[in-house]
Amino acid sequence: MRPLGAGDPRALGEYRVLGRLGTGGMGQVFLGRTPDGRTVAIKLIHPHLAHEPEFRRRFRQEVAAARRVSGEWTMPVLDSDTEGELPWLATGFVPGPSLTRVVEELHGPLPEFTVWRLAEGLASALGAIHGVGVMHRDLKPSNVLITLEGPRVIDFGIARAADASIATRTGIAVGSPGYMAPEQVRGERLTEASDVFGLGAVLAYAVTGNGPFGDRDSAAHTLMHRVIAEPPDLTGLAGPLRDLVERCLDKDPARRPTPLEIAAEAARHVDPNGEEGVWLPPALTARLGKEAAGLLALGGPAAEDPTAGPAEPSSTPYNMPTMTASSGERTPPRPGTPPPPRA
């Protein structure tokens, strides 16, 4: 988290703004705090989008839809102001880096036992999102947070408002090259299977450290061509995990597995005799615990420093619920699967 700049807001609605978390294509993200001390993430929309009537209309629709999502591994929309000069929305906040940062800075590619748990959590999140008629549309490593409890999917659904606005002006598909499904690249109608393609690409990245169609240094048009016309590069994946990723990345959306099927398959590869609460490598668990404690303890509730974050961290790990293929209901959390200790 970075300190607030001279032009940053000090309050949005009832929320005191504590610091800057980052900037994305739709807006700036701030850490905020409610009067009763709860921390939230607040996305403040960029002015150039806020001034477009079509964006406003779609943003209102997508925020209303996203507020119905309440899955275990999503970050729910808690509040919003869609009518202000600069619209904003507030979501739940948990301390955790993006999958991108975990792979590129904190640890490197993740072990298979962690990626199976990642697959289970992401599939459960997509099941919750799709269950209320919302699609994510932009599932990629930077939209997956890695926490001590499990992965969290962020920015679901809301991307559609920006996508529609940009597509209206430019006539091109909008998304993240290399993680967009072929039908999204072609500007065709998207379905839930389009999000499954993104899930498969995210899993490949988590295992190998590279996107299956190239890295972010590749030109966007090159990545899009590969997504449509070339098989994914799955070097470094093997066995059942490789098979699952290949099926998720099928060019034909009708042949991709559903989130329910992915969650059920991932559950079969989790050792029920593993140590409860363990889903990350030990060194990464220690690193995330230290970072979470540092972020949430900054200054405490009574601090005058505007970058302080007051809330206590969620420090008791628990495991991802599974989704049963028969009903779509989540079963209670169950033990994880630790490997032999490793760095």
Image: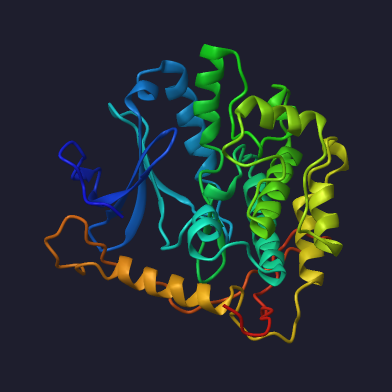
Tell me the quadrant of the picture where the N terminus can be found.
bottom left
Q: Is residue 270 left or right of residue 168?
A: right
Inspect this view and state whether residue 197 appears: yes
User: Of residues 142 and 317, which is closer to you in this image?
Assistant: 142
Tell me the residue at 74%/87% (across/down). 273
Inspect this view and state whether residue 261 appears: no
Where residue 293 sits, quadrant-wise, is bottom left
Tell me the quadrant of the picture where the C terminus can be found.
bottom right
Position of residue 216 measured from the top left corner of the image (x, y, whole percent): 57, 39
Q: In this view, does 160 lie to the left or right of 231?
A: left
Q: In this view, does 62 lie to the left or right of 173?
A: left
Tell me the residue at 42%/62% (across/down). 94
Position of residue 27 measured from the top left corner of the image (x, y, whole percent): 38, 35
Indicate the colouring scheme.
Answer: rainbow
Where residue 60 sits, quadrant-wise, is top left
User: Of residues 24 and 31, which is closer to you in this image?
Assistant: 24
User: Of residues 89 and 216, which is closer to you in this image?
Assistant: 216
Q: In this view, does 195 lie above or below 110?
A: above
Q: How many labels does the image show?
A: 0
Position of residue 228 measured from the top left corner of the image (x, y, whole percent): 78, 29
Position of residue 313 measured from the top left corner of the image (x, y, whole percent): 37, 72
Q: In this view, does 102 lie to the left or right of 50?
A: right
